[in-house]
Image (cartoon, rainbow, N blue to C red):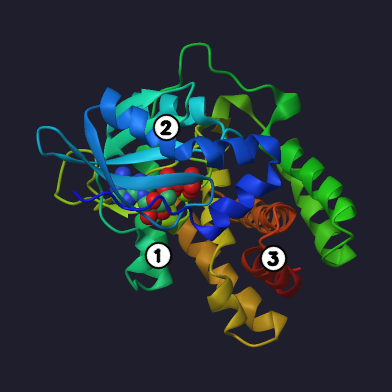
């Protein structure tokens, strides 16, 4: 392979800058790190892949001529959990993990095809496939000693983040949206039951669902996940993340909230039907995710990417 330039995508660069000196250091050391890993893992690093927000991802070729993908994550991400989840999954519902280095936030994984969001599939087809993938992904065993502290479960954490960011960002959405998100956070927190928790993906959006290049055991849905957070939570949380997207479709229904609500409700009903999970729980997680993601993305300065989440939340509140 000829040596391609190390091009960091704008969104990743923006996130790196938002981390201050840690992020700047990571950007500065990236070329050296790639060179070191090429030697240590006997790989030739090829062109970068687009689509991520917190990492440099590139195709690689191993010395024995096999394809792989190298991922170098920003230091702020929960990298150890990602590696742990991919390792325990052993390719079931997830990409195969080939090598990793926890200290340098580097991993090598099986080469996969394009992400689901690039294939022009109808949203309902994507939602059905994501449900099938999640059913398999939720079977990943807990790591030894993995537990969830009720005081730090996801609904509480998201509610606190929404409150904090709404103020610190100068109230970038309506009070009604924030109040709704906080009510739903409270309800999901009250419903928290450690006995029902599974190892969730944590961010199972179509950009993290990649087509398997060839049929294989563990990829029966035709796609597998990359980029897991791998914490313990209500599985309906993952379904809420799936519901969180579709901003273009929801806004394509015009400025009427009724039409957007009807469409989002139909996606939510499909998620409940395919998973057997409670529809209202999925709706509540979905709304909370929409608002918290919008605020989180605005915080690292990607206004264009974050705004649609808040605008659709206004339609659905
Ligand atoms: N194993 C892989 N095979 C092919 N493409 C991949 C692979 N892993 C990641 N990618 C591509 O890189 C993008 C970003 O990867 P991801 O792990 O989701 O990073 P981030 O943590 O930055 O979101 C994915 O959306 C996908 O397009
Ligand atoms: Mg990703």
> If the image is split into quadrants, where does the C terminus sit?
bottom right
Residue at the spot 63% in from the left edge and 57% down from the top edge: 283
* Spatial separation of the CA atoms under disc 2 and disc 1: 30 Å
Label ID, residue 303: 3
As displayed, is residue 149 above or below residue 306? Answer: above
SS type, badge 3: helix
Whichever of callouts 3 and 1 sits on the residue coming sooner in the sequence is 1
Residue at the spot 82% in from the left edge and 66% down from the top edge: 173
**Residue 276 screen position, x and y as percent:** 46, 49
Judged left or right of residue 172, residue 258 is: left
Residue at the spot 34% in from the left edge and 39% down from the top edge: 70
- Whether disc 1's CB lies below 8 Å from ligand 1 is answered no
SS type, badge 2: helix
As displayed, is residue 247 above or below residue 194? Answer: below
Q: Which residue bears the numbered disc 2?
A: 33
Q: Are marks 2 and 1 in contact (CB under 8 Å)?
A: no
């Amino acid at each position: 392979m000829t040596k391609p330039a190390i091009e960091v995508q704008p969104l990743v660069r923006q996130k790196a800058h938002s981390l201050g000196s840690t992020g700047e250091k990571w950007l500065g050391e990236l070329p050296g790190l790639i060179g070191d890993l090429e030697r240590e893992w006997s790989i030739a690093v090829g062109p970068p892949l687009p689509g991520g927000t917190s990492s440099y991802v590139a195709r690689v070729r191993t010395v024995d001529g096999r394809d792989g993908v190298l991922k170098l994550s920003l230091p702020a991400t929960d990298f150890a959990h990602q590696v742990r989840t991919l390792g325990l999954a052993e390719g079931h519902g997830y990409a195969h993990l080939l090598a990793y280095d926890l200290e340098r936030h580097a991993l090598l994984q099986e080469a996969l095809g394009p992400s689901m969001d690039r294939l022009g599939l109808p949203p309902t087809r994507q939602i059905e496939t994501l449900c099938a993938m999640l059913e398999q992904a939720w079977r990943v065993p807990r790591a030894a000693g993995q537990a969830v502290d009720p005081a730090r479960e996801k609904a509480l954490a998201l509610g606190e983040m929404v409150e904090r960011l709404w103020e610190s960002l100068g109230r970038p959405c309506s009070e009604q949206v924030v109040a709704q998100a906080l009510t739903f956070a409270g309800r999901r927190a009250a419903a928290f039951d450690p006995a029902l928790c599974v190892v969730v993906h944590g961010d199972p959006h179509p950009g993290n669902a990649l087509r398997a290049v060839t049929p294989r055991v563990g990829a029966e849905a035709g796609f597998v996940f990359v980029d897991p957070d791998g914490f313990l939570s209500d599985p309906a949380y993952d379904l809420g993340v799936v519901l969180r997207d579709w901003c273009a479709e929801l806004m394509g229904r015009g400025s009427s909230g009724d039409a957007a609500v009807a469409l989002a409700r139909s996606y939510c009903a499909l998620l409940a039907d395919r998973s057997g999970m409670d529809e209202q729980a999925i709706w509540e997680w979905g709304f909370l995710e929409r608002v918290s993601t919008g605020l989180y993305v605005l915080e690292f300065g990607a206004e264009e990417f974050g705004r649609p989440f808040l605008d659709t939340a206004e339609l659905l509140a």
